[in-house]
Image (cartoon, rainbow, N blue to C red):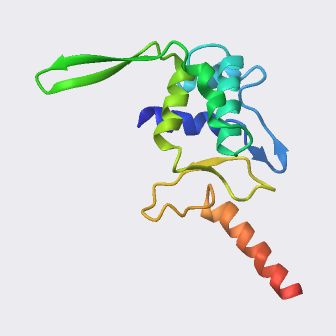
């Protein structure tokens, strides 16, 4: 679960603010952003995995494009009193981000307010029907826009 929350933070590090795209992993504050979120490594590596996962979630590239981040990852069995537990080894942050994506891929999606929003969401609703990053912003904007469109047709 912590890696899933971190993946969402990473994906949402490139928001649209007042119609202007912002990238928190570029510029002088990028290192601080990574440290605050406990992400090791240079900003370029975080941007690369963020952009790769985002492209998969948006359907722009196939999921197999993420394979390069998993090259050194392996599962190792460990016997304990509870039976066999699997431990992941060799998972640096980019691999952890891809493994987190694999855990939530059926519920991870971009906000449907494509014109004004670049954020992602993990839908934890029972119906798996959530469409917006925030109902109070993106949801209301789209609903109001559709309503105005119906009034003027």
Left or right of residue 39: residue 150: right
Name the foreground residue: 139 vs 18: 139
The residue lying at 77 percent from left, 24 percent from top is 26
Position of 5 relative to 49 (above/below):
below
Q: Quadrant of residue 62?
A: top right
* Position in image of residue 145 (x %, y %): 79, 73
Residue 50 falls left or right of residue 107: right
Q: Is residue 152 left or right of residue 33?
A: right
Q: Position of residue 15 (x, y in %)?
A: 73, 42
| Foreground residue among 43 and 110 | 110
- Quadrant of the rendering where the C terminus is positioned: bottom right
> How far across and down, in percent of the image, does residue 130 sit?
56, 62
For the image, the number of numbered tags is 0
Q: Which image quarter: residue 139? A: bottom right
The furthest residue to the right: 152
**Farthest-out residue, left:** 81
18 vs 36: above or below: below
Residue drawn at the location 68% of the way across and 69% of the way down: 140
Comparing 87 with 134, the one in front is: 87
């Amino acid at each position: 679960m912590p890696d899933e929350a971190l993946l969402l933070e990473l994906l949402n590090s490139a928001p649209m603010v007042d119609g202007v795209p912002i990238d928190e992993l570029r510029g002088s504050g990028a290192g601080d952003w990574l440290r605050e979120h406990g992400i090791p490594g240079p900003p370029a590596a975080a941007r690369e995995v963020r952009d790769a996962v985002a492209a998969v979630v948006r359907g722009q590239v196939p999921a197999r494009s993420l394979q390069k981040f998993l090259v050194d990852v392996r599962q190792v069995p460990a016997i304990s009193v509870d039976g066999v537990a699997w431990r992941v080894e060799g998972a640096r942050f980019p691999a952890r981000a891809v493994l987190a994506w694999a855990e939530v891929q059926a519920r991870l999606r971009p906000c449907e307010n494509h014109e004004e929003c670049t954020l992602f969401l993990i839908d934890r609703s029972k119906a798996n029907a959530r469409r917006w990053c925030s109902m109070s912003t993106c949801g209301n904007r789209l609903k109001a826009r559709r309503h105005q469109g119906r009034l003027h047709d």
